[in-house]
Image (spheres, rainbow, N blue to C red):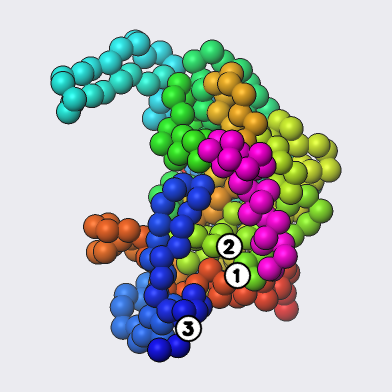
Amino acid sequence: MSQFDFTEHPHRRYNPLNDTWLLVSPHRSKRPWQGQVEKSAPDQRPKYDPKCFLCPGNTRASGDVNPQYEGTYAFTNDFSALLEDVPEGSFENGDLFKAEGQKGICRVICFSPGHDLTIPEMETGDIRKVIDLWVKEYSELGSKDFINYVQIFENKGSIMGCSNPHPHGQIWSQSIVPQEPAGKTKNQRKYFENHGTSLLSDYLEIELKEKTRIVVENGHFVAVVPFWAVWPFETMIISKRHIQNITQLSDSEKDAFADIYKRLTTKYDNLFEVSFPYSAGIHQSPTDGQHHESWHLHMSFYPPLLRSATVKKFMVGYEMLAEPQRDITPEFSAHRLRELTEVHYKKSD
Ligand code: H2U
C-alpha cells in the first residue's frame, strides 16, 4: 500500500474555527457526470431600472422613496427578520421546549446607484465607499445597548436567494451572538489562551509559506481557499494584521480590503464566465462590550458553483445526514482561481 497523500486519498479535515470536520474524496473528482445541467441566466441589465426597488429615486415596496443617491445608500429593511420593538421574554417547558425573544435591526446596503454593476465590475474607489459604510453601520448599530452582534453579508445571484440584481448587501444585528460567530468566538478564545497568538495569524503564517491555497494577496490582506473549505471554491479574506473588527482598519487597510474584494470576485466571475453567485459575510468581534482580543477579522465566501456556470453543489444525502463532503481539493480550487486573469471577462477582448 502506498503512503497516505491528502491530494489523492479519502480523508477528513478539521476546521479549527468552527470545531467541525469534513470529508474530502479527491479520487471522486474523476467520476463521470450525468447529472443536472442548468442554463445560466443572461446577465444584461440597464444602468437604471424603473421597476427596481433599490435604484435611486424609485419607490420601494413599503411606499418609501429612495433618494437620488450617488454613492452608497443604507435603509432599514422594509421586511426585517428582526424587529426593534419586541417585548422581552422567553418560553420554557422543561428541558425540551425553549424559546427566547430576540430584538434586532436589519439594514439594506445599496453598493452603487448603477443597477447594471456588481462588486467585481465596480471601481475599487467605489468599493471603498461600501467599506466605509460598513464601518459606519457596524459602529452605529453596535453601539446600541441591545445590539450585541452585527452580521454584514452579501447574497449574490438568484440561486443564493438574492431577491434583486441591483448591487446590494444586508446587515442583520441583534441582541445575542448567533451560533456561527458564537462558535468562532469560543474557538478563537481557546486557541488564544493556549498559544498566546491569534488562530488566524498562525494559520496565515503557514499558508503564506506553503502558498498552495493562496488565491490573491496584497499588502494588508490574503484571500485563501481554507484547508477546511466545504464549498468547492470557498475562500476567506483574512487581514494580515491581527485586528478584531472593521473599525480598527486604517485608511490604507480599507483601500486594500476594497482591492482584494474586487480582485477575488473578478477571478470568481472569470472562472465560468458568469456573474458568480455566493453568500459572503464579515466575521468580526461581537459588540457586547466584552474584550475580544482573540478575534481576528475575516470575510468568508461560500459559492455554490461546482464544475461550470450551470452545475452547482448541493448539500444532500450523506452531507445532510452525516457531515459535509467535497471532491475537488482546496489546493486544486486555489490553483484554478490563482491561474485566472484579474481582467474581468466582460472587459477582455
Ligand atoms: P436579498 O436580495 O438578499 O433578499 O436582500 C434584499 C432585501 O431588501 C430583502 O431582505 C429588502 C428585502 O426585504 N427589500 C426592502 O426592504 N424593500 C423593498 O422595497 C424591496 C426589498
Q: State the image coordinates of residue 334 (x, y, percent, origin top left).
A: 60, 70
The secondary structure type at the circle numbered 1 is helix
Look at the numbered discs 2 and 1 and tell me whether their residues touch, using CB distance below 8 Å. yes
Q: Which residues are magenta?
A: 189-211
- The residue labelled by disc 2 is 225
Mark 1 and mark 3: Cα distance apart in space? 24 Å
- The residue labelled by disc 3 is 3
Determine the main secondary structure of the stretch shown in magenta.
Answer: helix
The kind of residue tagged 3 is Gln
The reply, left or right, for residue 345 in relation to residue 124 is left
Badge 2 crowding class, 10 Å Cα cut-off, few under 14, some 14 to 19, many 20 or more, is many
Badge 1 crowding class, 10 Å Cα cut-off, few under 14, some 14 to 19, many 20 or more, is many
The kind of residue tagged 2 is Val
The kind of residue tagged 1 is Ala
The C terminus lies in quadrant? bottom right
Total count of labels: 3
Residue at 59% across, 18% down: 289
Look at the numbered discs 3 and 2 and tell me whether their residues touch, using CB distance below 8 Å. no
- The residue labelled by disc 1 is 334
Magenta stretch encompasses residue 208: yes
Mark 2 and mark 1: Cα distance apart in space? 6 Å
Magenta stretch encompasses residue 121: no
Badge 3 crowding class, 10 Å Cα cut-off, few under 14, some 14 to 19, many 20 or more, is few
